[in-house]
Image: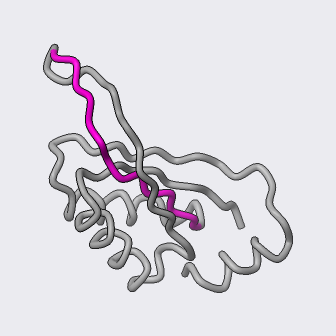
Amino acid sequence: MKLVIVQTTCEDINEAKKIANILLDEKLAACIQISDVQSLYIWKDKLCNDNEKLLSIKTKKKNFKKIQRKIKENHSYDLPEIILIDIEDASKEYKKFIGENAK
């Protein structure tokens, strides 16, 4: 079982919780952390500086496409960040936790 973290940012806590709840309700993720981040980026030739919510979604790699689709369906951004990060190693107990809680 290959474990990953999927990251996305949201414009506010309501959108972040909505996406997190959908993913957890559908057992696409075992755990989702929501953090405050300040994002600086270029969008349409303009420097942007926004306060956002970062979701760190712990799941199985096989769920990535479904998670990506759910994020796109429920996100307010034209181009949401959706990044997959491989987990190279984790404790046996944490691997079991993800395995039991993400389908």
Residue at 46% x, 50% y is 7
* Front position in the image: 1 or 70: 70
* Residue at the extreme right: 92
Q: How many marks?
A: 0
Residue 38 vs residue 100: left or right? left
Magenta segment: does it hold 47?
yes
Q: Residue 81: where, in percent of width, then height?
A: 34, 43
Q: In the image, which residues are magenta? A: 46-59
Based on the displayed image, in which of its 4 quarters is residue 59 positioned? bottom right
Give the side of residue 85 with respect to residue 75, left or right.
right
Residue in the picture at 70% in, 80% down: 97
Q: Residue at x 52, y 47 (%)?
A: 84
Magenta span: predominant SS is: strand
Q: Is residue 38 magenta?
A: no
* Residue farthest toward the top in the current orientation of the protein: 45
State the residue in front, 67 or 9.
9
**Quadrant of the drawing holding the N terminus:** bottom right
Q: On the image, which quarter does residue 21 sit in?
A: bottom left
Q: Looking at the picture, how far across and down is residue 34, in whole percent?
A: 45, 61
Residue at 66% in and 85% down: 100
